[in-house]
Amino acid sequence: MSVPFWVWAITIVVIAGFFIFDFYSHVRTPHEPTLKESGFWTIVYVSIALLFGVIVWIVWDGEHGMQYLTGYVTEKALSVDNLFVFALIMGAFKIPRKYQQKVLLLGIVIALICRLVFILLGAAVIEAWSDVFYLFAIFLLYTAIKLFYDEATDQPETDPNDMAIIKWLRKVVPVTESYHGDKLTTKNHLGKFALTPLFVALLAIGLVDVMFAFDSIPAIYGITSEAYLVFTTNAFSLMGLRQMYFLLDGLLDRLVYLAYGLAAILGFIGVKLLLHALHENNLPFINGGENIAVPEIGTTTSLLVIVGILVVTVIASLIKDKRDEAQGGHRGPATRIDYDDHGNRRRVDSAGRHLEWIDDPATSGKGDHTATGSRETDHLEPEIHPDFKDD
C-alpha cells in the first residue's frame, strides 16, 4: 500500500501540532517539571503512540500494525539510551534544570526534521538498490559490537564541547559565559550580537540525536520497509522524550545493563537484516546473484525477542542495584547537582529546592558578570506548572 501525500501531510501537521502545544503549554515558562507532571505527560504521549498503532492496524492491516508496534518499542528503547547523552550534555554545559526543557524540546524537533530527510533518502536508496540491506546489516552489527565493547571496557563519553561544529561555532560567533534566562541569543558587554550557552547546548542535543539516527533508522528499516511507518515510529518515540528525561532522572544510573541490552537488540536486527538481504540477494558474487533460501525472522518474533531482551535487561539491572545497595548500605537522602545562570554548582533536594552552594557565587568569579555574585537563592527556587501544584 502506497501512503498518499495527503496522509503524510496530515500526519506531519498533527505531530508538529503536538510539539507546538508542548512548547506553549509547558516549556515557554521556564520551570523544572515535577515527577507528577512528567509521569502524566509520558503516559499521555505513550497512549497516543499506541492509539496510532491501533489506527494503523484497523486502516492498513494487522501485519503493518505489528511492524509499527515493533518499530515503536525498538525506537523507544534506543531513545532511552539518548537520555544518558542528554544528561552528559546538560552537565557539560552546566544548564540550570529550569532551562533544560527548552533545550530538550527544540533539540528533539531539530533531530526529527533531520531524521525525516534521512528516512526519505533511505527509502529512495532501498527502492533503487535493494542490496543496501547488506550495508545496513553490517553497520548495525558493527554498532552492536562497539556498544558492547565500549560498555564492557568503560570507555569515556565524548565531551560535547569537543565536537568540531561546536568548536567552530564558538570561533565564528561570540558566546556568552553566563546564561541569560532561557534566551538563545543576547548582546554581550560590547553591545554586539552573541549566542548564549543555551543555543550551543541546543545544537549539541540536536546533532547528537541525529548521530543516533544513523543506527536507529537502519534498525527500523530492518523491521519495516514502509517509510511512513519508519517516520511515525521515530516521531512518536521522540514525542514525550523530554518528559521521560525528567521522569527517569536518577533511574538511568541504575539501568547498568541497558547498553548490553541495546547492543543485543541492534545485533538481533542486524542478523534479521542480513537474512533478509540473503533471501533477496542480487549481488553477482554471492550465490551467482541468486536468492539464498535462508529462514527470515517474522515481525511477531522480532517483537517478542526485543521486548524479552528489554525485560531481562531491566530486571537484571534492578537486581544488581538492589544487591549493590544491600552491600553498600542505605542510599541516603536523594540530592542532586544543579547550576545557577553563571555555572555555579549547588546541591538541591529531589524537589529542586536549594540546599547548599558547592561553588560560592560570591567568590567563584564564574560567568560573564564582573562583580561578585549573589548568594541569594529565592530566585532559584523551583516553579511548578500550575496544573500540577498540590492542592
Image (cartoon, helix red, strand yellow):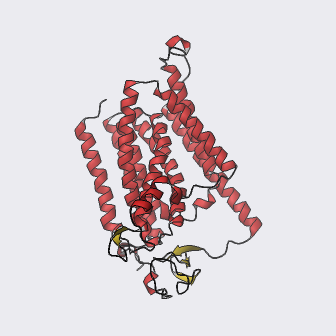
The answer to whether 228 is drawn above or below residue 366 in the figure is above
Occupied quadrant, residue 156: bottom right
Question: In this orientation, does residue 269 appear?
Answer: no
Question: Quarter of the image containing the C terminus?
Answer: bottom left
The answer to whether 178 is drawn above or below residue 42 in the figure is below
The single residue placed furthest to the left in the displayed view is 6
The answer to whether 300 is drawn above or below residue 290 in the figure is below
Who's the residue at 39% across and 29% down the image? 125
Foreground of the two, 367 or 217 = 367
Foreground of the two, 258 or 180 = 180
The answer to whether 285 is drawn above or below residue 263 in the figure is above
- Residue 23 falls left or right of residue 383: left
Pinpoint residue 356: horizontal percent, then vertical percent.
57, 83
Labels in figure, total: 0
Who's the residue at 50% across and 54% down the image? 163
- Residue 155 falls left or right of residue 7: right
Pinpoint residue 198: horizontal percent, then vertical percent.
42, 66
Question: In this orientation, does residue 282 appear?
Answer: yes
Pinpoint residue 107: horizontal percent, then vertical percent.
40, 57
Question: Quarter of the image containing the N terminus?
Answer: top left
The single residue placed furthest to the top in the displayed view is 288
Foreground of the two, 174 or 201 = 174
Who's the residue at 73% across and 62% down the image? 324
Pinpoint residue 282: horizontal percent, then vertical percent.
47, 17
The single residue placed furthest to the right in the displayed view is 327
